[in-house]
Amino acid sequence: MKSSITTRFSTAVVLVSGFILLVIVGINFLFIKNQLIETANTKAKFEIYKSQNRINRILYHAINSCESAKAMLSRVDFDKSKISHTLEQTLRQNPNIYGMAVAMEPDVIYKKPFCPYYHKSGQDIHYVNLATRSYDYLKQPWYSDVNKIRSAKWSEPYFDEGGGEILMATYSNPIFADGKFAGVVTIDLSLESLSRIISSIHILDSGYAFLLSKDRTVLVHPKSSLIMTEYRDKIIRFDKIIKEDKQWIYYTKIDSTGWILGIVLPQKELFSSLYQITTISMLLALLGVLALIVTIFIVSSKITKPLKRVIEKSIDISNGNFDQHIEKSEIKDEIYQLSTAINRMQDDIKSYIENLKIATIKEEKRKSELDIANKIQMDMLPIAQDCDLESRVRLYASLNPAREVGGDFYDFFYLDEDRLCFVVADVSGKGVPAALFMAVAISYIRAYSSGETSPSAIVQKVNNALCINNEASMFVTLFIGIIDLNSGKLSYVNAGHPKPYLHSASKDSYQIESANDPVVGAMEDMDFQEFSIILQRGDRLFIYTDGVNEAFSKEGKQFGEKRLKSLLDTLSSLSSDRVLCEIRQNIDVFCIDEPQSDDITMMLLDVTI
């Protein structure tokens, strides 16, 4: 016979209320924590932005001053008296510049080594002759490195012993005479001026900023003992606040030099308000639970023995003990039904927790592997962002995979000092299989390019290699070209790839001639037709994958070749990086609310021969 125990359900109030309070406190804790982190990230980004702009203004001003001085000295054929006057005047007009020098290569303009150096000391400007045996400016990195690469660059910060005798960074701009390297014009920046900017950054009570070089040497830091030592913490992410030990750090790169600017926020200060709110919430929750316990204790004085057993076992279960079942009462009343339900729930929770652990481990492993695969894939590609290749061609490329990893790729490399090989390709399929096939294709292209002068010969070898053991029947469409940097002759092969567009100053964009060649990797011993054209100064070659012209809008329309050609003509006056950026933005607007369906890869080759 069933007996009513409706009033006894008051016991459940304690358990349910306690759980709800804990959940509320936990959610509140996580929400406030995320808000504090996001606020700190925003503040750090703002401070970084302000400081980065100030630093960049100093760096760009120094570069412009160096360019102006170089141009002025070139007009007077680097006359020694004019050199001294120009260096002194530039230093007096630029408060942020510490020193300047003109270092000449012997036997080009002047027979003997010649290197006048002017630097500031207080309000005065001092002269130092660096053309001495003890200093030997020809072996200094700021001179020898530029001599090797023949282009302007910032040096890594160093202590200039025998020169300025301070911690500085040097910008060196090469001088050429009749096509020969004739020396450099340099500008020195004292790190003291940057230190003042970094030291002015303050977030919270004890937050601070620091500056690192490209090789992670500490340049500016509140602890002077760390300056010019190696930064030991691992930088795992840029432009996003991350946690390291008991502090949060925001890293960003300064584009013009590659230096790293960081802001440190102590965790204790960042979450001080969170800890206070959480403590108060926990106290209130505890007081609420205690009040419920007292109330229920008064009511439970009349609870029967079977229900006490249920309560005792329920407490064990709430503490995580899922192995002991509740003993069922002899009378099949509500307690009996409750015991049965709790025992079943206990088994289900135990099973669910185990399944959840397994699923979580698998998902984390999958995501981790895809993240690693994406980084490996991106690291395989050369950095092609407005690359000035010996002042003869300028190359800019971008790749945006549709998934974590993709099958598009691009590459460029020298076959010798006068010939540059470049390739844009698209692997069939998507995801991990395409990424693996892409890695194999890149390796074959680089391997078979060694010693070859013909794009068709390279493609034929790559095709035969990819056909071996290709049971998945994957293939690659590609455009590969070899440009003679002296004559401007471009030899190329188009294997099933979209035809590139060529734009010149006298003619709108048009697709260059290509054959209906087969894709690479589908069938062995295929012939690939080679074409050649002469590129003139000012010509611009745009190569892309079908993720550009076949991008779909939410209405199912394609971006299309006509829209792409019109856009290229409209953007012809912009720089390469701006052209690719504008094309990408136009695709994003066209495909708004529609997920990216294919990898998008673009390359621009500007001829400056």
Image (spheres, rainbow, N blue to C red):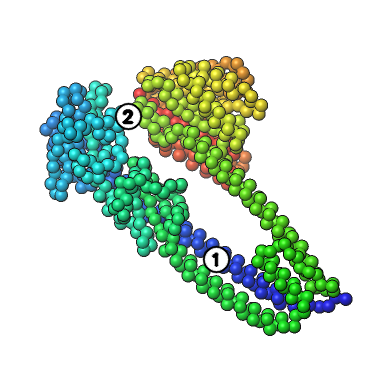
SS for callout 1: helix
Amino acid found under the numbered disc labelled 1 = Asn
Look at 31% across and 36% down and name the residue there: 153
Q: Position of residue 412 (x, y in %)?
A: 45, 28
Quadrant of image for the N terminus: bottom right
Quadrant of image for the C terminus: top left
The alpha-carbon separation of the residues under discs 1 and 2 comes to: 57 Å
Determine whether 178 is above or below 209 in the image: above
Q: Position of residue 310 (x, y in %)?
A: 74, 72
Residue 209: name its quadrant: bottom left
Can see residue 499?
Answer: no
Q: Residues within 10 Å of mark 1 (few under 14, many from 20)?
A: some
Q: Residues within 10 Å of mark 2 (few under 14, many from 20)?
A: few
Residue 203: name its quadrant: bottom left
Look at 69% across and 66% down and name the residue there: 317
Q: Is residue 277 left or right of residue 521?
A: left
Q: Nearer the viewer, residue 199 or 349?
A: 349
Q: Position of residue 197 (x, y in %)?
A: 29, 53
- Residue where numbered disc 1 is placed: 28
Can see residue 575?
Answer: yes
Q: Is residue 200 left or right of residue 46?
A: left
Amino acid found under the numbered disc labelled 2 = Ile
Look at 76% across and 75% down and name the residue there: 307
Residue furthest right in the image: 1
Q: Nearer the viewer, residue 499 or 291?
A: 291
Q: Earlier in the sequence, mark 1 or mark 2?
A: 1
Residue 393: name its quadrant: top left
Q: Is residue 449 left or right of residue 313?
A: left
Look at 39% across and 34% down and name the residue there: 386
- Residue where numbered disc 2 is placed: 149
Q: Nearer the viewer, residue 59 or 1?
A: 1
